[in-house]
Image: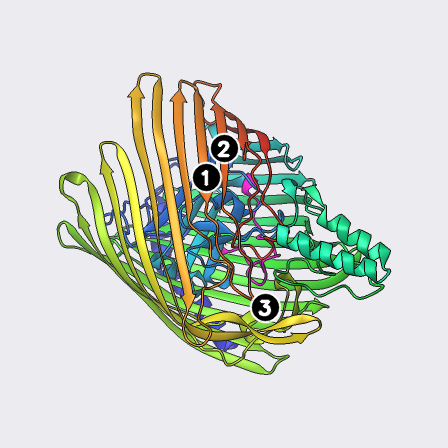
Amino acid sequence: MKTLTSPLAVATVLSFALTAAPALAETSGEGEAATNRPLSPAIINIGSNIIVSAEGLEELDFIAGQDVLEEEDIQENLDGQIGELLDKLPGVSATSFTPGASRPILRGQDGERVRVMVDGLGTADVANTSADHATSIDPLTVKRIEVLRGPAALLYGSQALGGVVNVQDRRIPTEVPEDGLRLDALTAFDTVSNLRSGGASLDVALGDMFVVHVDGSYRETDDLEIPGFQLTDDLRADLLADAAEEEEEGELEEAAELREAAAQEGFLPNSATETYTFNGGIGVILGDTTFGASAGYYDTFYGIVGNPEGGHHHGEEGEGGAEEEGEEEETVSIGLEQWRFDFRGDIALGGGFAERLKVRAGYSDYTHTEFEGSEVGTVFETETFEARAELIQSGGGVIGVQFTSRDFEAVGEEAFVAPNETTQLALFTVQEIDLGGVQIEAAGRYERVDVNSDTVGVERDFNLFSGAVSVVSELQDDLGRIGVTLSRSERAPAGEELFANGPHIATQAFEIGDPNLGIESAWGLEAFTRINVGGAAINLAAFYQKFDDYIFLNPTGEEEDDLPVFEFLQSDAQFYGFEADATVPLVESDGFDLSADLRASYVKANLSGTRGGDVPRIPPLSLLGALEADVDAFNVRGEVQYTDGKSGTEGLETATDNFTFVNLYLSWRPLENNQNVVLQLAGENLFDATGRRHSSFTKDFVTLPGRNIRLSARVSF
C-alpha cells in the first residue's frame, strides 16, 4: 500500500497549496511591511496555542486535560529528559529508566500510546520501542511545551490514544524580531550530577521579509548522586544470599563482587550523559503569510545503569538470570544521532470558507547504537517522513490531512524486532456549534495504517475511526465552564507488537509479537470543569476508558536465552482516575503577592478476562502543594511533592514505598526594563529523601536524584 498512499498524501497537500496560491499572490502583492505582531489564531493547530480565539470559537473544551509550560516553567523544572521535566504536572509521570532516558507517561499510558512531537510533528526516534531509548529533544532550546490528555489527542494520530506532548522551538522563524535581532539563552549548573549546560538561539532579520535562525546546546553530567543505597532492601538481600552461596562453593571473587554491588551507595554507576545539538533555519515573512525551513542535528551519549543481579541487564525488573561463569559484565551505553529537516507554511487565504492553510513537513534520519563496553552491540535505524496540512475555517473549525512513513531496522544481538515499514494516512476535522450558553464540539479522524515486514513475510492493513463529542455549558456569572465528553479511539498494533521475536534486555524479557493482533479500541467518558471564582482558578477532570483488545505483554512461564518469555496478547481493560489543580491568591498588595498552587492526580488500571489483575507500572497517587510569593523583583516558591507507595504485580513488578520531596526556588529579575532576564537558585529534594518511581522498569536499582542545588540563568533580548 505504500506506493498508493504516498502519492495520495502528496497530492492532497499539493491541492491545498494550489488552492491557497491566489490568496498568497494577493497578500504578497499588497507590499505590506512585515511586523512582529502575532499571526491570526488557529484552531487546535499543532504548533500554535492550545487555547485559541478564532472567530466563533474561544476554546475547544474537550481538551479537558491540558497544561502549558512556558520558558519560566522550563527553567524551574529543567532536566535533560522531557519525561522528568513534566513529571510535576497532574496526570503526568515518567518512565525514569535511567538519567539519560525518560519518556512522559500520561494517565498511565506510555510508549505507543503517547505521542511526543516537535512543533506538531513526531520526534521520529525509537523511544517508543523501548524504555531505555532516549527522546531526541533538548529542553535547553525549547520555548514552550503543550501537554494534552484525553480525547483531544485523537486529532494528532492513533498513537496519541493516551495523550500528546508537543514541544515548540524556534528553529523556523514566524515573525520579524523587534529591532531586527532576538537572542534567547539558558544555562544551568547543579551539584547532584555536576551538570554543565548551556543553550542559545539567535534570530537575525535580513530586511523586512527574511529571518535567519541558529541555535545550539550542550549538556554534560557525571554519575548521578543518590541518597543511601542504590538497590532496594529486597534486591540487596538477594545479592547477599547469593554471595553466601558463592562463598560456600569456594568462589570467593564472585562473592566479593556481589557484596560490593549490594553495598553500592551514594551514586548511580554508569549514569553520566553528554548531549549537544545544532539547528539552523530561515523564515520568509509576507504579511500574514509565512514560510520557513530548518535543518538540525541531535547527538547524545549516555550510560545505562545495570542491574547487578544479572549480566548484561540494562534495565530488567524482577529476578534476573545469573551471569555465566567466566563471562564479565560489560558496561552498556547508548550513542544516538539524528538529522532532521523541516518545512512550515502558514498561508492567509483572505476570507471566504477558509481563513488559513497551515502545512508542516519533516524528514528524519535516525541512528541509535548500543555499545557493550567498546564493542557495538545493536544498531537501530529509522527513516521517517511526516506531512500535515490544516485548513482553518473562517467561522470556526478545521479540516486536515496527515501522512507518515516510517522505515525501521535493527541489527545486532538485541535486534528483537524484525525490520518493518509503517505508513499512515489520515483525514481529520473538528467543529463547534454554539447554541447560546451551550456549545457542542465534535472531532473525527479516519486513519489508514499499513504495517509490513518483508523479513517476516507479513503485511497488515488497518482502517481506524476515532471521534469525540463534547457538550459544554457556561456557568452563571462568568464563573467558568462545565462539560462532558464522549470519545471513541482506535489504534493499530505497532511493528514492535506485531514482529517482536527475541531477547529484550531492557524489560528483562524474551518478547514474542503476534502478527495477527487486531485493532485496539477504547470508549472514553470524561467530565470536567474550569472555575474562576474570587481570583482562584480551579480545574477538575475525571475520566474513564474502557479498552477492547488492549495490547499488553503477558508472561508465559517459559524461559528462552535465560530470560522469561513474554508474549503480546489482547484483553479488555479499563483505566479511570482524576486530575485536579488550583491556583488560589492569598495576599495581593503593592509590591507583594502570595498564592497557593495545589495539584493532584490518580489513575487505576486493570485487565479483564483470564489475565486479570492490575496493569503493571501504573503511577500511584501524587500530590503537590506550593506557596509562591512575588516581592518586587524576586519570586520565591516552596513545594512539597508527595508520591504514594504502591504494591507490586506478581511476576511483573515489585512494590514501591511512598516518598516526599521538598523543593525551594528563588528567582531574581535584575533588570527592571526586561523581565526575561532571570537568575534562579533552586534546591530540590532538600531532605535527601529516597524516591523510586513505580512506573519505571528499573526502580529496584535506579533511584531518583538526591539533594540538588542548581544555579541557572535565562536571558532574552
> Which residues fall within the magenta stretch?
121-140
Q: Which residue is mark 1?
A: 641
Q: Is residue 125 magenta?
A: yes
Q: Is residue 238 left or right of residue 518?
A: right
Can residue 336 be seen in this snapshot?
Answer: no
Q: Which residue is mark 3?
A: 407
Badge 2 marks a residue whose secondary structure is: strand
Query: Marks 3 and 2, Cα distance to the nearest angstrom?
Result: 44 Å
Closer to the eye: label 1 or 3: 1
Residue type highlighted by circle 1: Gln
Which residue appears farthest toward the front when viewing the image? 248
Q: Callout 2: 10 Å neighbours few (<14), some, many (20+)?
A: many
Give percent across and percent down for residue 275.
Answer: 65, 44
Q: Is residue 201 above or below residue 436?
A: above
Give percent across and percent down for residue 119.
Answer: 47, 50
Check whether the beta carbons of the residues at disc 3 and disc 2 lie within 8 A of each other. no
Badge 3 marks a residue whose secondary structure is: strand
Check whether the beta carbons of the residues at disc 1 and disc 3 lie within 8 A of each other. no
Give percent across and percent down for residue 180.
Answer: 49, 31
Q: Tell me the residue at 52%/48% (across/down).
A: 657
Residue type highlighted by circle 2: Asn
Residue type highlighted by circle 3: Asp
Q: Earlier in the sequence, mark 3 or mark 2?
A: 3
Q: Which residue is mark 2?
A: 663
User: Which quadrant of the figure has residue 223?
Assistant: top right
Q: Tell me the residue at 63%/40% (across/down).
A: 226
